[in-house]
């Protein structure tokens, strides 16, 4: 009996020993490093910018003369704005459409007067290569004249309106941009104005309907693609003089096609 009990103890001990697999130390270290790396990566993503605080370079520190140059550039921007407005008005070209599409193509903050920046912000053109639709009015063209070195604009055709809305259209929900891929989003916001889907939205913009203002409040400014080399060369020259800024009339559709 004693021998049988001893054999049973040996078998149980062997089974217990067999159940605990041996894991090499190097594998355990790799697992630990992997888990630590995953934890660090998660924290980096939560903090943003990989958790590193951006260091200021010596070149980023402004000297007193830099502030003087910026101030002078802003004052020159204001003077030129006033000169553009006071110039003798030539007969304006006939308005071919009630709809205008405006694109911001310049964005220098250091040489921009606060009044210029305020007008661009009011037009929802807070960054370069953003575009907005607007109703063609005398007051709008007066604003565009003031910020002419920073924008180009013209009359979009129905195809351009449709392509822009389908590719770039979005609205803001709880502070986040949401693409217009679901007609329920449009219906919830604009259904009271009998705009139930993206086709109704495009039609309201293209014909500048009675609820055009409500549609513009619903839409966010369209974020266009940066132009490839050669699309925009002499940005601050007026388009009618071979440059890029100002009124392009129907030619705006060619630029939309390249930036959409």
Image: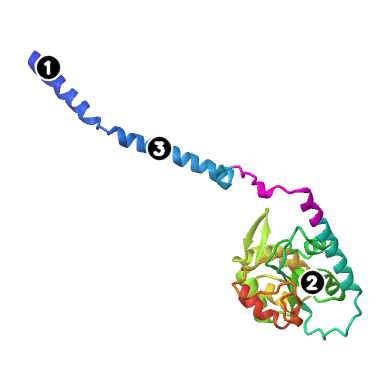
Front residue of 55/30: it is: 55
* Residue 176, percent from left and from top: 65, 55
- Location of residue 249 (image quadrant): bottom right
Circle 2 Cα neighbour tier, 10 Å, few/some/many (<14 / 14–19 / ≥20): many
Q: Was residue 81 drawn as part of the magenta stretch in this picture?
A: no
Front residue of 23/232: it is: 232
Q: Was residue 67 drawn as part of the magenta stretch in this picture?
A: yes
Q: Which mark is nearer the camera, 3 or 2?
A: 2
Segment colored magenta: 53-69
Report the residue at 70% width, 74% height from top.
234
* Residue 104, percent from left and from top: 72, 68
Query: Residue pushed farthest top?
Result: 2
Q: Is residue 1 visible?
A: no
Q: Which residue is mark 2?
A: 148
- Counting residues from the N terminus, which is met first, the one under dot 3 or under dot 2? 3
Q: Is residue 89 left or right of residue 111?
A: right
């Amino acid at each position: 009996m004693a021998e049988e009990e001893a054999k049973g103890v040996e078998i149980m001990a062997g089974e217990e020993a067999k159940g605990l697999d041996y894991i090499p130390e190097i594998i355990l270290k790799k697992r630990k490093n992997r888990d630590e790396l995953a934890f660090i990566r998660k924290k980096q993503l939560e903090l943003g910018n990989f958790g590193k605080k951006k260091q200021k370079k010596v070149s980023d520190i402004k000297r007193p003369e830099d502030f003087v140059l910026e101030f002078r550039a802003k004052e020159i921007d204001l003077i030129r704005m006033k000169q553009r407005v006071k110039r003798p008005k030539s007969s304006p070209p006939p308005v071919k459409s009630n709809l205008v599409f405006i694109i911001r193509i310049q964005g220098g903050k250091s040489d921009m007067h606060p009044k210029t920046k305020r007008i661009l912000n009011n037009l929802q053109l807070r960054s370069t290569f953003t575009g907005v639709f607007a109703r063609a009015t005398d007051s709008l063209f007066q604003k565009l004249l003031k910020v002419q070195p920073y924008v180009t604009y013209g009359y979009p055709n129905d195809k351009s309106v449709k392509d822009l809305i389908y590719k770039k259209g979005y609205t803001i929900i709880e502070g986040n941009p949401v693409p217009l891929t679901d007609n329920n989003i449009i219906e919830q916001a604009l259904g009271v104005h009998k705009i139930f889907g993206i086709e109704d939205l495009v039609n309201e913009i293209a014909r500048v309907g009675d609820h055009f203002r409500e549609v513009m409040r619903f839409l966010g400014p369209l974020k266009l693609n940066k132009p490839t080399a050669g699309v925009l060369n002499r940005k601050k020259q007026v388009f009618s003089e071979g440059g890029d800024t100002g009124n392009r009339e129907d030619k705006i559709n060619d630029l939309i096609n390249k930036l959409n």
